[in-house]
Image (cartoon, rainbow, N blue to C red):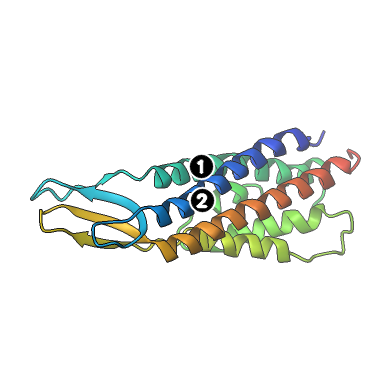
């Protein structure tokens, strides 16, 4: 019996919505935060004790984004595994990527820049009611936005008193945050479409 994905898909969508809001908050926070030199940006870490090279994370925005991304990663992988497993339960042998790749593909260095997109793209295309329809543009757009949202660039400022601050410039935070919001929206579209398509198919 194939997995019914509709109910679980809403959990994934809720997690994606939380991630999108966290990225949006990070963008707003980056423009309202100003350092001693008048530069805006999202504070990542500070060190206030002279001679101490340990940075303590202090940015609420960064904490929210990291927590939301971790939550999405877990629930999205579970959903992807269930969606891929449905092909096996329906005896569909025309799928290139095995179930193990729905999990392992995310954790292989360098390969994880490509494999998850290919796995999701195949699940998306194979789940479509029209099996000949193979357009994966929405998956490609989602993956590009996701990769951009993960870009990290920081600048370090050392003040006269010895305090050091690491922050992400406002422009960079706006680009990566905006990409994060877009990735969350497109991810929700993919999850809902695949879930609806698969649940509409009769069990084999």
**Is residue 97 visible to the viewer in this orientation of the structure?**
no
Measure the alpha-carbon separation of dots 1 and 2.
Answer: 9 Å
**In percent of the image, x 77 and y 42: which residue is there?**
86
Q: Position of residue 84 (x, y in %)?
A: 71, 47
Q: Position of residue 199 (x, y in %)?
A: 84, 40
Assign a secondary structure to mark 2: helix
**In percent of the image, x 73 and y 44: which residue is there?**
83
Assign a secondary structure to mark 1: helix
Q: Which residue is mark 2?
A: 23
Q: Position of residue 48 (x, y in %)?
A: 16, 47
Q: Is residue 10 positioned above or below 48 on the image?
A: above
Q: What label does residue 144 carry, if any?
A: none
**In percent of the image, x 32 and y 56: which residue is there?**
34
- Quarter of the image with the N terminus in it: top right
Q: What label does residue 68 carry, if any?
A: 1
Q: Position of residue 143 (x, y in %)?
A: 60, 61
Q: Is residue 90 left or right of residue 27?
A: right
- Quarter of the image with the C terminus in it: top right
Determine whether label 1 and label 2 are within 8 Å by CB: yes
Q: Nearer the viewer, residue 135 or 132?
A: 135
**In percent of the image, x 91 and y 40: which residue is there?**
202
* Mark 1 or mark 2, earlier in chain: 2
């Amino acid at each position: 019996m194939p997995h019914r994905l509709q109910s679980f898909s809403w959990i994934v969508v809720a997690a994606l919505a939380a991630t999108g809001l966290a990225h949006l908050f990070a963008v707003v926070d980056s423009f309202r935060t100003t350092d001693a030199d008048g530069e805006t940006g999202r504070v990542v870490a500070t060190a206030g004790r002279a001679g101490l090279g340990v940075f303590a994370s202090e940015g609420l925005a960064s904490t929210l984004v990291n927590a939301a991304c971790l939550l999405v990663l877990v629930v999205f992988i579970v959903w992807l595994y269930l969606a891929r497993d449905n092909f096996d339960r329906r005896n569909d042998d025309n799928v290139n990527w095995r179930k193990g790749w729905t999990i392992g593909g995310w954790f292989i260095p360098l390969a994880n820049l490509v494999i998850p997109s290919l796995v999701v793209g195949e699940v998306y295309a194979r789940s479509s009611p029209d099996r000949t329809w193979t357009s994966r543009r929405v998956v490609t757009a989602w993956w590009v936005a996701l990769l951009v949202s993960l870009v990290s660039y920081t600048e370090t400022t050392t003040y006269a008193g010895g305090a050091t601050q690491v922050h992400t410039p406002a422009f960079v935070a706006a680009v990566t945050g905006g990409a994060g919001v877009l990735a969350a929206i497109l991810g929700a579209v993919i999850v809902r479409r695949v879930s609806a398509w698969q649940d509409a198919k009769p069990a084999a």
